[in-house]
Amino acid sequence: MSDISPTVTQEIICAETPAPPVAMVVFGASGDLVHRKLLPSIFELYGRELLNAGFYLIGCGRTQFTDERFRTDAADAIRETLGGVSSDVLNRFVAGLYYVCGDYNDGSFYKAVAVKMNELDRRHNIGGNRVFYLSVPPPLYGIIAEGLGNAGLACQVPGCQNVCVVVEKPFGRDLKSAVELNQVIQKHFSEHQIYRIDHYLGKETVQNIMMLRFANIIFEPVWNHNYIDNIQITVAESLGVEYRGGYYDKAGALRDMFQSHLLGMMSLVAMEPPSSFEADHIRDEKVKLLRSIRHIDPQNAITDFVRGQYIAGVVDGKPVPGYRQEPGVRHESKTETFVAAKLFIDNWRWFGVPFYLRAGKRLAVKNTEIAITFRKVPHSMFVSAGLPHLPPNVLVLQIQPKEGILLVFQAKRPGSKVCIGTLRMQFAYSDIFGSVPPEAYQRLLLDCMLGDQTLFTRQDEVEACWRLLEPVLQAWENQSTMPDEYKAGVENFPKADMLIESDGRKWRSLSAI
Ligand code: BG6
């Protein structure tokens, strides 16, 4: 196999729109997501001069911090995540951070936030644009939304662009709880103020699915059941549940990854072309697609969805514990850490094309990719040269960690007259654009501040995903058996292999990136 690297022939300057004057309030401010993702991403936006000079951030939580202690904590977290940052810039940034401590169930907490915001809005010259970020366990979403509403913090100030609330996934645990949660939040915030975050949508390579499909003419004619044999979407992680055992054990791979990231990527790959890049035009098409996925009946919920749980093994040459030995995980836990499924879309474009989706923790490598395998040529004219079957073309959208695109095709090799080889034409973002793409949270946080909901999930999308998965949740709940085990460090969950092999196909090898 050989690599052919394309180059950018037309340089397009894409200037980012900077955020308007805005204040941000982060609930759960001493949590890990805030340390590893939010604060470093906001700091990078600051460094890129995309935040307004008046920007300020209030951290909120139960931990007893002063403003000064929160600043030190934030600076440490930023340094730890980003490495060598300028102390000068960091000191200027953290000077705009404040802290309010309180109990989420206590109305006076939100009143204290309101008082602090009124004072800081004046000092920082912010006219009332506000982003409330809920980086807290899901059961607190409704409680905080209610608290903000009762303290008058959800109201849009006349003349201001945006007061919004950002909610992390999973949004609900099933259809019923997602509807109920939405009702609570919508008592105070309307849909255009609610930003349901799925950080996968902020990844450059996930956004590129739309550019690739709809900014080129060559893919659309073959993007259907006439030319495509199957589509595989994989999110493989080498990490385990880390410090998040408590949360993860109540969620599992189906709720944590499948309901959001996997179905989100599937809808972008398979949706019809939206008429414009407007948030609702795109989201309308995604919902339409999600609603066209074939209903999963109780039998298919068992045969077409397989789940596994990792046991102790070796990853990257190091021994790692099994899932049930991880901190925060119940010793008798039945929670799945791997899920694989086969789905069909009942519409003209995709009729009969299987979509194989899988997500798992503690696998041999980290790799997220979407592999589109085309049908084989209908007839080989190279039979006499010993090639009765030619391998299919495969287009791989490499989401991470090696962001790029790969096309596998056949071509003449130098040598005898009929000598065919499989070539890989590949481009890597880092080779062409010089650096790794920015962290997804930067894009998403900036979009919240700008009031752009394109990359956020609308309530009807959330509901369509839960509705689809209801029979699986039900079937798994009724099963008394444990999920099958897989050894940490394996390339794939053996039952996932069986799922696809029973159709005469194979998963693309994770190490073939
Ligand atoms: C999160 C999940 O949404 O995505 C985690 O809750 C998972 O369990 C993470 O590890 C994976 O994100 P990424 O960007 O590392 O692929």
Image: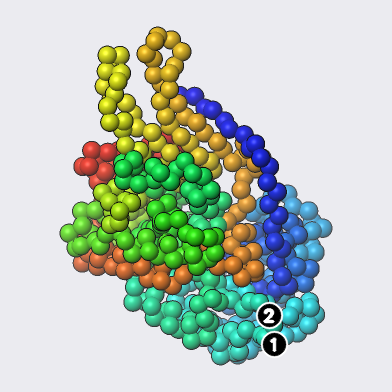
The single residue placed furthest to the top in the displayed view is 416
Q: Secondary structure at mark 2?
A: loop
Q: Which mark is residue 160?
A: 2
**Quarter of the image holding residue 247?**
bottom left
Categorize mark 1 by other alpha carbons within 10 Å: few (<14), some (14-19), many (20+). Answer: few
Q: Which mark is residue 115?
A: 1
Q: Amino acid at mark 1?
A: Val
Task: Judge whether 442 appears above or below 424 on screen.
Answer: below
Image coordinates for residue 357, horizontal then vertical, percent: 35, 50
Residue at the spot 31% in from the left edge and 46% down from the top edge: 225
Residue at the spot 76% in from the left edge and 64% down from the top edge: 93
Disc 2/disc 1 C-alpha distance (Å): 19 Å
Q: Is residue 204 left or right of residue 355?
A: right
Q: Which mark is residue 151?
A: none
Task: Judge whether 477 appears above or below 253 on screen.
Answer: below
Number of callouts in the render?
A: 2
Image coordinates for residue 510, horizontal then vertical, percent: 41, 39
